Image (tube, rainbow, N blue to C red):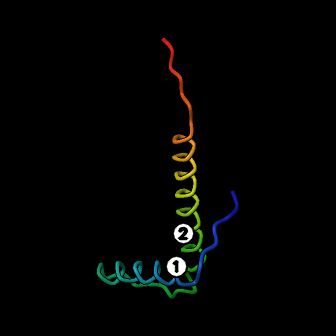
């Protein structure tokens, strides 16, 4: 499966959520540049899992299963 394309907006949005959580728990939040590769990788994994789940649903929908006992 080809790697999902991640936009800068998606990375920024994920970083903003991460920064909010960090601030609310009193943690020091690293700069976007420091965590951008990890955020990008995480978003790619999420997209791939969603794509895979969609493909599985399509296969299930189109599958002809004949159970004979």
Q: Secondary structure at mark 1?
A: helix
Nearest the eye: 31 or 67: 67
Image x and y of residue 64, in percent:
56, 31
**Considering the numbered disc 2 on the image, is that residue within a helix, a strand or a loop?**
helix
Residue 58, horizontal then vertical, whole percent: 55, 47
Identified at 40% across, 84% down, the residue is 28
Q: State which tag comes first along the sequence, 1 or 2.
A: 1
Above or below, 3 against 65 in this view is below
Q: Which mark is residue 1?
A: none
Q: Name the spot of residue 54 as percent of width and height, x first.
A: 53, 53
- Residue at figure coordinates x 53%, y 86% from the top left: 32
Q: Quadrant of residue 21?
A: bottom left
Residue drawn at the location 52% of the way across and 62% of the way down? 46
Q: Which residue is at 58% across, 50% downward?
A: 55
Q: Nearer the viewer, residue 9 or 33?
A: 9
User: Considering only vertical position in the picture, is 68 above or below 56?
Assistant: above
Q: Residue furthest right?
A: 2
User: What label sits on residue 10 in the rendered view?
Assistant: 1
Crowd around label 1: few <14 · some 14–19 · many ≥20 (10 Å)? few
The answer to whether residue 56 is left or right of residue 5 is: left
Residue under label 2, please give it. 43
Q: Is residue 28 left or right of residue 61?
A: left
What is the tally of numbered marks visible in this picture?
Answer: 2
Where is residue 43? Give x, y as percent.
54, 69
């Amino acid at each position: 499966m080809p790697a999902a394309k991640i936009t800068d907006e998606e990375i920024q949005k994920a970083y903003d959520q991460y920064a909010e959580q960090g601030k609310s728990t009193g943690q020091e939040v690293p700069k976007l540049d420091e965590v951008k590769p990890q955020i990008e990788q995480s978003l790619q994994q999420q997209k791939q899992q969603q794509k895979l789940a969609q493909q599985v649903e399509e296969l299930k929908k189109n599958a002809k299963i004949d159970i004979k006992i």
